[in-house]
Image (cartoon, helix red, strand yellow):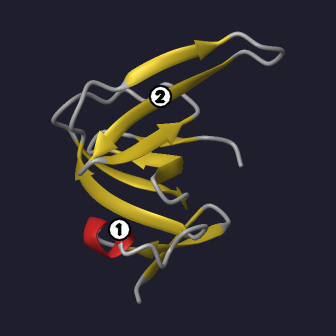
């Protein structure tokens, strides 16, 4: 099993198929894929104003607290925690930039 390090954490390098077998629930993972839909960016104006961006890679929901400059059809690498039906992303890497959220 290959791993990579980003920041203070190690991530399992997986394919979408490996992820969908469910063995990695709750683990830090990194997957690559193409953004299938227009990312939805929501402004959340609660006590601490923040943003949440959601999109899909191979029908896998990706949620990121921030506003990465990504679009439909773009190739991305997503680092985050696998929660069963998707990934809570800690970082999104594109050809042009690395977007990182606070841990």
Front one among 45 and 95: 45
Name which of mark 1 and mark 2 comes first in the sequence.
1
Q: Position of residue 33 (x, y in %)?
A: 24, 53
Q: Tell whether 6 sits left or right of 60.
A: right
**Element carrying mark 2:** strand
Q: Is residue 56 above or below residue 1?
A: above
Residue that sits furthest to the bottom in the current view: 1
Residue 34 at what x, y percent from top left? 20, 46
Name the mark nearer the viewer: 1 or 2.
1
Farthest residue, direction top: 45
Q: Quadrant of the N terminus?
A: bottom left
Q: In the picture shown, does residue 40 fall above or below 83?
A: above
Residue 22, image x and y in percent? 44, 73
Q: How many marks?
A: 2
Q: In the drawing, what numbered circle is on residue 41?
A: none
Mark 1 surroundings: few (<14), some (14-19) or many (≥20) residues within 10 A: some
Question: Which residue bears the numbered disc 1?
Answer: 20
Q: Is residue 73 above or below residue 5?
A: above
Q: Residue at x 39, y 74 (%)?
A: 13
Residue 94 at what x, y percent from top left? 31, 44
User: Distance of mark 1 from mark 2, alpha carbons?
Assistant: 22 Å
Which residue: 37% across, 70% down? 19
Residue 97 or 60: which is nearer the viewer? 60
Residue at image location 37% in from the left, 40% down from the top:
97
Image check: 77 left or right of 89? left
Element type at mark 1: helix
Q: At 36% across and 35% down in the image, what residue appears? A: 55
- On the picture, is 97 further left or further right than 47? left
Q: Which mark is residue 53?
A: 2
User: In the picture, residue 15 is in which quadrant?
Assistant: bottom left
């Amino acid at each position: 099993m290959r791993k990579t390090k980003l920041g203070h954490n190690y991530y399992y390098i997986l394919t979408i198929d490996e992820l969908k077998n469910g063995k990695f629930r709750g683990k830090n993972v990194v997957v690559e894929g193409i953004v299938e839909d227009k990312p939805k960016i929501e402004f959340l104006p609660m006590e601490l104003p923040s943003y949440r961006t959601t999109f899909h890679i191979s029908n896998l929901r990706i949620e990121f607290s921030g506003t990465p400059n990504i679009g439909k059809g773009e190739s991305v690498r997503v680092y985050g925690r696998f929660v069963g039906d998707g990934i809570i992303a800690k970082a999104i890497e594109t050809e042009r930039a690395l977007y990182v959220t606070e841990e």
